[in-house]
Amino acid sequence: MKLIILDRDGVINQDSDAYIKSPEEWIPIEGSLQAIARLSRAGYRVFVATNQSGLSRGLFTVETLNAIHRKMSDAVQQVGGHIDAILFCPHGPNDGCSCRKPKTGLYEEISRRTQQSLKEVPVVGDSLRDIQAAIAVEARPILVRSGKGEATFAHLIKTLPGVSVYKDLFSVAEQLLNEVTSTT
């Protein structure tokens, strides 16, 4: 079973330093929905793992977050894709939980649900904590330059050389699908 794990803000949708607090503020990055659809059609199970500290900060409710995720899932379905599950950490940076990236709780839950090791599973993110969590579970860390990815890249090149870097999620999907066709 092919599996891919995506961060949400900055990878699938536009990020905001003021947080994505409503379905109206959720705006997909160009090509991201099509990338998920292409991966889905190629047999990938797509999981989203996202830190959502806006919940603990009182910026939005779980009901609002669910509405944002419904909008995202519906948008992906409209272009022929599917998201298998969306897992989120509701905690703030100082809450001491095990699920907030760069900790690995969200990824470990995906491993449990799929009964699959995450070794070499592509994990796509735009922040250093996405990359750190991927490395911690022996996944294949992939940085996109969308969202906060440009700033992360400037730091990443100095601290974690060897991480794959792509323009955006669409470019990642193209590469993964090319790898599949070149091995068959």
Image: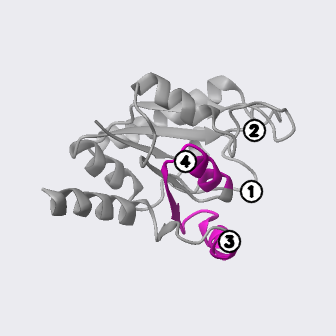
Question: How far is mark 1 from mark 4, CA to CA?
Answer: 16 Å
Q: Earlier in the sequence, mark 4 or mark 2?
A: 4
Relative to residue 9, is residue 91 depicted above or below? Answer: above
Taking the view exactly as shown, the residue that stands out farthest to the left is 184
Helix, strand or loop at label 3? It is: helix
x and y percent of residue 32 in the render? 41, 55
User: Residue 165 or 139: which is nearer the viewer?
Assistant: 139
Q: Name the amino acid type tagged 1.
A: Asp
Q: Earlier in the sequence, mark 4 or mark 3?
A: 4
Residue at image point 22% right, 46% down = 42
Taking the view exactly as shown, the residue that stands out farthest to the right is 94
Relative to residue 2, is residue 15 depicted above or below? Answer: below
* Residue on which the image places disc 2: 53
Q: Name the amino acid type tagged 2.
A: Ser
Q: Which residues are magenta?
A: 129-158
Q: Find residue 176 and report its image quarter.
A: bottom left
Q: Is residue 182 left or right of residue 143?
A: left
Q: Earlier in the sequence, mark 2 or mark 1?
A: 1
